[in-house]
Image: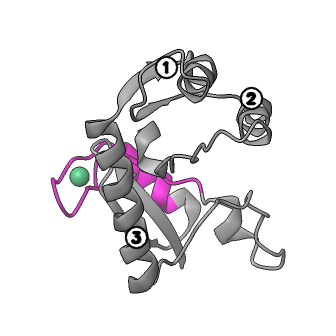
Amino acid sequence: MIKYALACEQAHAFESWFPSSDAYEAQLARGLVTCPVCHSPQVEKQIMAPSIARMDKPPMAVPAQPVAAISDKEREIRSMLRAMRDHVVQNAENVGHGFAEEARKMHYGEAEQRSIYGEAAPAEARALVEEGIDVLPLPVMPDDRN
Ligand SMILES: [Zn+2]
């Protein structure tokens, strides 16, 4: 007896026993091998996945994915960061890439003092801090990029 993993044309997978591989071929040719789900005689042997067929080898190394298990505390911090970010975004003026320039103008009294946000390269942000200009990194939430 020989056991085959089979699948019909609609991908219903099932297993069946045959006296021999010749008997399987003969029954298949006469349309006697049918899917137990849809009774289709269009049945084929399934190719075993290498990971199932070769149990003697360790599983293939899969590239690691970034994962995190977030505690309730961290969830809380995340939502606080999000609230702070949202507050800034709603109450400050978006000056985009002109952030460093605008922050400098405000610092030296060339522009009205107000809350602004925008984008600054790390070197730009560092330069602002060195000039005594308070800048605050805005948290970027991972799902912002979705
Ligand atoms: Zn089927």
> Which element type, helix, strand or loop, lies under badge 3?
strand
Q: Quadrant of the N terminus?
A: bottom right
Q: In this view, does 8 lie to the left or right of 26?
A: left
Closer-to-camera residue (95/82): 95
Q: Looking at mark 2, is its residue's CB closer than 8 Å to ligand 1?
A: no
Highlighted magenta segment, given as a residue range: 23-47
Q: Main secondary structure of the magenta part?
A: loop
- Give the residue at mark 1: 96
Quick check: can you spot residue 9? yes
Q: What x and y, as percent, mark residue 55?
A: 75, 78
Q: Distance between the residues labelled 1 and 3?
A: 62 Å
Q: What x and y, as percent, mark residue 88?
A: 35, 43
- Give the residue at mark 3: 15
**Up/down of 85 relative to 76, above or below:** above
Q: What x and y, as percent, mark residue 105?
A: 58, 19
Which residue is rendered at x = 46% and y = 38% of the image?
A: 145
- Give the residue at mark 2: 124
Which residue is rendered at x = 39% and y = 32% of the image?
A: 114
41 drawn magenta: yes
Which residue is rendered at x = 26% and y = 46% of the image?
A: 41
Residue 60 occupies which quadrant of the picture?
bottom right
Which residue is rendered at x = 46% and y = 77% of the image?
A: 74
